[in-house]
Image (cartoon, rainbow, N blue to C red):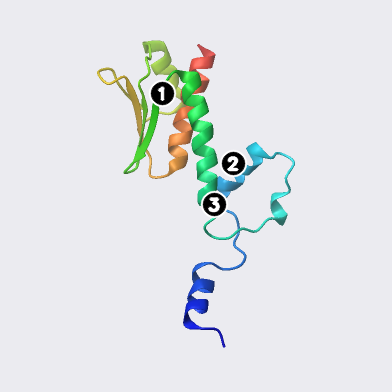
Amino acid sequence: MPSRAERLQRWLFPPEVELPEPARRVLRSVYPTLDLRTLRFHLGIPHIFNLFAIQGAKLKLARLGADYLVFRGGRATVGPVELGSGELRALRGRVETAVYTTARREVSLRDEEFDGALRLVDAMLETRQAA
């Protein structure tokens, strides 16, 4: 009979857990030929994939000329970045609720998920490349 600690560990960390969709997207972008249907992961592993996503966002921020991406309390903030009125219009066409603060030279977005922060960075990069 398994001990109480072993039962608790199995309850918290089942041996096979489906990989969440955000982690699957990151894996698909990093390893396009990987067969994700055959993969099963420990429950804590998907958090590691957020680290991959953060590193990708840092590379994109460098291309934008921004120094930081902060995600705290359901709000993503990217800055400092200069946006002209045309770029801001194009960005709001991609992300309607993005807010640009000229005094701080920051773009922010309210979203409860970290994916919202990544979408904001992607939209800013697409807007900059289209201009």
Chain-order first, disc 2 or disc 1: 2
- Label at residue 46: 3
> Where is residue 51 drawn, in percent x and y?
51, 42
Residue depicted at x 61% and y 67%:
15
Q: How far, Cα to Cα, is label 1 from label 3?
A: 31 Å
Query: Three-letter amino acid code at disc 2?
Result: Val
Identify the image quadrant of residue 19.
bottom right
Q: Which residue is mark 1?
A: 92
Which three-letter amino acid code belongs to the residue tagged 1? Arg
Mark closest to the chain's N terminus, 2 or 3: 2
**Mark 3 crowd level (few <14, some 14–19, many ≥20, 10 Å Cα):** some
Residue on which disc 2 sits: 26
Residue drawn 49% across and 37% down?
54
Answer left or right for 6 relative to 87: right
* x and y, in percent, of residue 18 in the image: 60, 59
Of the image marks 1 and 3, the number of the one nearer the N terminus:
3
Q: Secondary structure at mark 3?
A: helix
